[in-house]
Amino acid sequence: MAFEGLTSKLSEVFKKLTSRGKLSEQDVKAAMREVKMALLEADVNFLVVKKFIKTVSERAVGSEILESLTPGQQVIKVVNEELTNLMGSTVSKLTVASAPPSVYMLVGLQGAGKTTMAGKLAGYLKKQGKNPLLCACDIYRPAAIQQLKVLGEKLEIPVFEEGQKDAVKTALHGVQYAKDNGHDAVLLDTAGRLHIDTELMDELKRMKKAVDPHEILLVVDSMTGQDAVNVAQSFHDTLEISGVILTKLDGDTRGGAALSVKAVTGQPIKFAGVGEKLTDIEPFYPERMASRILGMGDVLSLIEKAQAAFDEKQAAKLEERIKSQKFDLEDFMDQLQQMKKMGSMSDILAMMPGMNASKLGNVELDEKQLSRTEAIVSSMTVAERQNPAIINGSRRKRIAAGSGTSIQQVNQLLRQFDSMKKMMRQFTDMERGGRRRGRMK
Ligand code: GDP
């Protein structure tokens, strides 16, 4: 999991800080030395670390903090704030053209995740009601054009391509095509090389001049640490990028790229790629990322995920069913499926405060339980789901056999469902009694 090493080291430092009632300047300085080591080990750029420690130390040794009632907590708060600042303080949105289409040029090394990100971003924009066009400007690898076409098909988003002719012309024609066909956003997927090379940079410069994009977004593989920073620096020097997109933040990145790239280029991180699926894209929130690094969890992202997964209409329908006491196993199944849409249980738990990988040992078990429950309910007939009371001994036997579980497991689920219904009944009774108000989601 991302930032794991950094998170556990920082939490050790913080544990020491908060275990004392009073802190001296020396204590803070010692803690800062440890924070410094942890950041360097996480592959954060040396100059970035140096400046960071200086800023935090200056703020943390002030009398306001040392003489406060909770000095340890105050120091952590300062670290949190400065980590947030390091990554950009506020969320940065994409620039939108006053006269469409908005043109977004994606650049980066080969393998950084550019093509995937072009697809993810197009899908993201489509969800926001835009009408994007993907444009295949990586003319050197036929496979790249094909890859983009496959993504376009999956997303039902058109892909403009002119084969392997001329990257700059393809970009120009793509933008024109977008204008002529009412697309309000164009995503240019450009070529990448394994290393920075002048020929490629020249082509990108020419493309920039020709299409005058509204954003040049550098796609950076967050697993590459220090190297990512050097790459970002050279791309910025030649192209003046307007933002960064970090990919593979779902992997076990140590954190270096995420924490250095904004400081080094001065340009904000706008999005993060957090998996291989096309929906694995998130706007980058520096504050949440800082909290995640500090092991304080990411409750806001969790809430957003829940909101995205739970469909409003379905929630209203469910509320109605609960109120009229009609909630049955079919609804229960719907709920399970909605939960699954939020991602794997371990993804969800990783976002909770105080969670880290070492504490997630039992999660796999829970996921198994979830699939088992789903299998059991799937093996029931509609009549059984709507009225579980009819599930007698022979039906139980059939359901267990159908779902590859045991009769005990079927019994257990029915018992759980029963107590859930009882709880719901109490809840609705209470609401009727006027003692409790408010919508239930
Ligand atoms: P490009 O050469 O820059 O266009 O890179 P690709 O888009 O082809 O991606 C390279 C590899 O990284 C592919 O195997 C992708 O599936 C994978 N990848 C891209 N983004 C992510 C991400 O956010 N998380 C993970 N785990 N893999 C990713």
Image (cartoon, grey):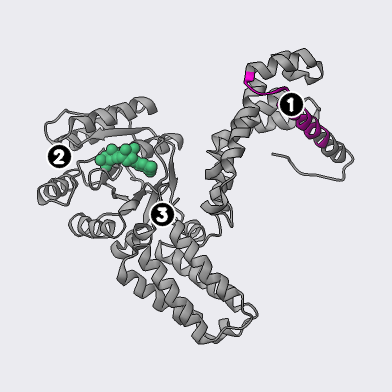
Q: Main secondary structure of the magenta part?
A: helix
Quarter holding residue 56: bottom left
Reading the image, the residue beneath label 3 is 92
Q: Residue furthest left?
A: 199
Q: Secondary structure at mark 2?
A: helix
Instruction: Specify the amino acid type for callout 3.
Output: Ser
- 101 to the left or right of 276: left
Reading the image, the residue beneath label 2 is 168
Query: In the image, which residues are magenta?
Result: 403-423
Q: Position of residue 372 (x, y in %)?
A: 63, 28
- Between 394 and 299, the one nearer to me in the picture: 394
Q: Position of residue 345 (x, y in %)?
A: 56, 41
Residue at (74% x, 26% y) in the render:
408
- 374 to the left or right of 77: right
Q: Secondary structure at mark 3?
A: loop
- Between 400 and 231, the one nearer to me in the picture: 400
Q: In 3D space, how far apart are the residues under numbered discs 1 and 2 (Cα atoms)? A: 66 Å
Q: Position of residue 25 (x, y in %)?
A: 51, 86
* The quarter of the picture showing ligand 1: top left
Instruction: Specify the amino acid type for callout 1.
Output: Gln
Residue at (78% x, 24% y) in the render:
326
**Mark 1 / mark 2, whichever is N-terminal:** 2
Q: Position of residue 21 (x, y in %)?
A: 64, 80
Instruction: Specify the amino acid type for callout 2.
Output: Val
- Between 169 and 441, the one nearer to me in the picture: 441
* Label 2 with label 3: CB-CB less than 8 Å: no
Reading the image, the residue beneath label 1 is 408
